[in-house]
């Protein structure tokens, strides 16, 4: 039988600094896994440099649905300036559910022309896929021109109707948003909820 050996390591000097560096590197790597760190490369080609503005988490009856981050062209969000919304899903959601929920929210925000909503439903169905937990969708709003969408780095397509693009991004960014706390956090007006 081997004798029991008890090791007690208390790092000192260079070892302590090396361990601190490893911990800091781990923290930096963990921050890369949060929304708001990197957009698809094609966004820069379309909008120039965007920087993260704010982050938020959406929960429904305690269940986490997604993390979101807003990217803007300057230090402030301007409705008429380019901006991107990045959403990292925590659950599997069918694309048809994303479309239905989007149209319901657009309707709630005052768009009531059912013929037009039907056209918008078709346009959204063409760019909103099924998502799995961990998937990221990015929408780039170019006010007055439309919007482009990505699933990770893969382009999904574009909406060329400026009114639909504005109505879609209003779900999160309009003052009448169903989730005012989430909106405030995206705009950088409130600290993220913990």
Image: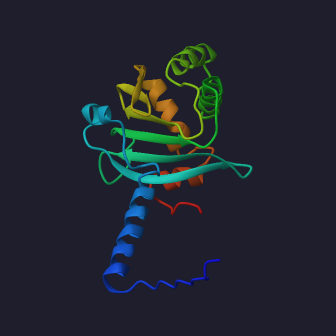
Q: Nearer the viewer, residue 145 or 123?
A: 123
Q: Position of 59 compared to 49: left or right?
A: right
In the image, residue 18 lies at what x, y percent? 34, 74
Q: Locate residue 147 relative to residue 134 in the image: left or right.
A: left
Residue at x 47% of width, y 52% of height: 34
Counting the numbered discs, the total is 0
Residue 155 is situated, as x and y percent measured from the top left of the image, at 40, 25
Q: Residue at x 35, y 28 (%)?
A: 144
Name the outermost residue toward the front.
1
Q: Name the residue located 51 percent from the left edge and 41 percent from the top edge.
A: 87
| Quarter of the image that includes the N terminus | bottom right
Q: Position of residue 169 (x, y in %)?
A: 49, 36
Q: Residue furthest right?
A: 61
Please tell me which residue lies in front, 132 or 46.
132
Left or right: 70 as drawn, with respect to 182:
left
- Based on the displayed image, in which of its 4 quarters is residue 42 positioned? top left
Residue 157 x %, y %: 42, 21
Q: Is residue 25 above or below residue 106?
A: below
What colour scheme was applied to this rendering of the protein? rainbow
136 or 114: nearer the viewer: 136
Dividing the image into 4 quarters, which one contains the C terminus? bottom right
């Amino acid at each position: 039988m081997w004798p029991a050996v008890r090791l007690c390591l208390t790092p000192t000097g260079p070892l302590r600094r090396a361990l601190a560096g490893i911990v800091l590197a781990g923290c930096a790597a963990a921050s890369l896994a949060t929304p708001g760190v990197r957009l698809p490369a094609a966004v820069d080609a379309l909008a120039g440099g965007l920087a993260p503005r704010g982050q938020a988490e959406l929960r429904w009856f305690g269940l986490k649905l997604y993390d979101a981050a807003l990217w803007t062209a300057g230090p402030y969000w301007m409705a008429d300036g380019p901006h991107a919304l990045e959403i990292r899903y925590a659950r599997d959601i069918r694309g048809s559910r994303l479309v239905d929920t989007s149209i319901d929210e657009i309707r709630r925000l005052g768009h009531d022309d059912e013929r037009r909503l039907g056209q918008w439903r078709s346009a959204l169905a063409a760019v909103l896929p099924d998502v799995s937990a961990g998937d990221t969708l990015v929408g780039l709003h170019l006010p007055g021109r439309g919007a482009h969408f990505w699933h990770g780095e893969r382009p999904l397509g574009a909406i060329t109707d400026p009114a639909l693009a504005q109505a879609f991004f209003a779900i999160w960014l309009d003052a009448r948003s169903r989730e005012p706390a989430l909106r405030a956090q995206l705009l950088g007006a409130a600290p993220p909820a913990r």
